[in-house]
Image (cartoon, rainbow, N blue to C red):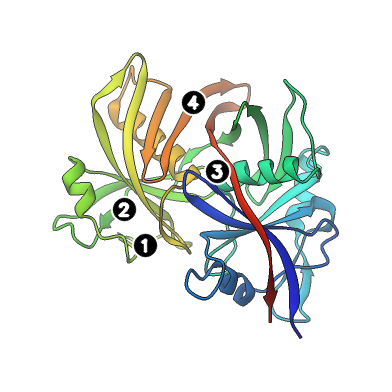
């Protein structure tokens, strides 16, 4: 039996998503349905699917007839009772993802444009994710999201990339989901990297990781702001035009490599545009914020098996 799904297509610096509204948790999709939506030849085409569902109604469907409660919704409300809405995010292969820095900005735009939520000037919008609650503020046509605390996690695996003859040392950073970042010497070397297949990590990480390849601008710092260029292979999606959490991880890794005196504000160029990163202290430790655009492109209805 087919179902009709009303959807919206959106993107943040080219990182694109299929979004749909399901406040009461009545229409969770299976991994195969999500993969079908994201297929760029036979579906709508996207890097991931985002379901707008209330945190109190969060559930998942493994297969038809197998719907289970997802405890991440209750965890979000326990962390912050204002997190009415949950970003139920899936990679293009149908697998779960903990967090998406571009996706959460597009999700906020979707909630506001559809009237599901509202924020006034100076207010924040709390959104539940599988990495915890994230707070967003509107900045004109852009959004800033507080990505919370981060940590070095995953060690220093060697990164082997197709098209690059010499393996590179990487550094593992977790910003709600796992990343490994490797530095490249120049743009030509970065452009030669073949990210049509996943880079190999040695040793492998148990849950895999997004892999970011980074080149510093010359000069690295101008007017107190660091500047780098990045490409990314996302776990479960392949190479994408942008990755918000990857941008954050890349800026953090570059600051680490640059050493004492490195700036806490960064511009990161990705194939889909430019994003801003800011590191700042809080009572619980350093947080990092991501700022950038969010666009809703079109709406439609699709039939799903």
Q: Do the residues under discs 2 and 1 have CB atoms within 8 angstroms?
A: yes
Question: Residue 204 has which mark?
Answer: 1
Q: Is mark 3 on a helix, strand or loop?
A: helix
| Residue sitting nearer the eye, 171 or 44 | 44
Q: In this view, does 277 lie above or below 107?
A: above
Q: Is mark 2 on a helix, strand or loop?
A: loop
Q: Mark 4 points at which residue?
A: 278
Between label 4 and label 2, give the one nearer the viewer. 4
Question: Residue 101 has which mark?
Answer: 3
Looking at the rendered image, the quarter that the C terminus falls into is bottom right
Q: Is mark 1 on a helix, strand or loop?
A: loop
Give percent across and percent down for residue 147: 58, 36
Measured Cα–Cα span from mark 3 to mark 1: 24 Å
Measured Cα–Cα span from mark 4 to mark 2: 26 Å
Earlier residue among tags 3 and 1: 3
Looking at the rendered image, the quarter that the N terminus falls into is bottom right
Between label 4 and label 1, give the one nearer the viewer. 4
């Amino acid at each position: 039996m087919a179902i009709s799904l009303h959807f919206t297509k959106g993107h943040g610096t080219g990182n694109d998503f299929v979004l749909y509204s399901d406040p009461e948790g009545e229409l969770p999709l299976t991994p195969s349905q999500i993969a079908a939506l994201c297929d760029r030849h036979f579906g709508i085409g996207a890097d991931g699917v985002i379901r707008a569902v209330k945190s109190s109604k969060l559930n998942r469907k493994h297969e038809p007839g197998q719907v289970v409660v997802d405890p991440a919704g209750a965890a979000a409300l326990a962390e912050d009772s204002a997190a009415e809405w949950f970003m139920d995010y899936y990679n293009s292969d149908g697998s779960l993802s903990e967090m998406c820095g571009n996706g959460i900005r597009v999700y906020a735009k979707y909630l506001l444009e559809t009237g599901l939520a509202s924020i006034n000037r100076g207010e924040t919008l709390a959104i539940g994710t599988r990495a915890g609650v994230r707070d967003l503020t509107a900045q004109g046509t852009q959004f800033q999201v507080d990505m919370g605390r981060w940590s070095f996690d995953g060690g220093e695996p060697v990164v082997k990339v197709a098209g690059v003859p010499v393996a590179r040392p990487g550094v593992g950073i977790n910003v709600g989901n796992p990343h490994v970042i490797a530095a490249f010497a120049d743009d030509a070397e970065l452009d030669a990297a073949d990210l049509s297949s996943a880079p190999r990590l040695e040793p492998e990480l148990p849950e895999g990781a997004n892999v970011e390849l980074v080149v510093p601008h010359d000069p690295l710092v101008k007017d107190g702001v660091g500047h780098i260029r990045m490409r990314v292979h996302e776990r479960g999606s392949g190479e994408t035009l942008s990755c918000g959490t990857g941008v954050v991880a890349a800026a953090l890794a570059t600051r680490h490599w640059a050493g004492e005196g490195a700036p806490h504000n960064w511009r990161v160029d990705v194939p889909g545009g430019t994003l801003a990163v800011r590191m700042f202290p809080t009572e619980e430790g350093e947080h990092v914020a991501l700022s950038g655009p969010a666009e809703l492109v079109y709406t439609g209805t699709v039939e799903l098996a």
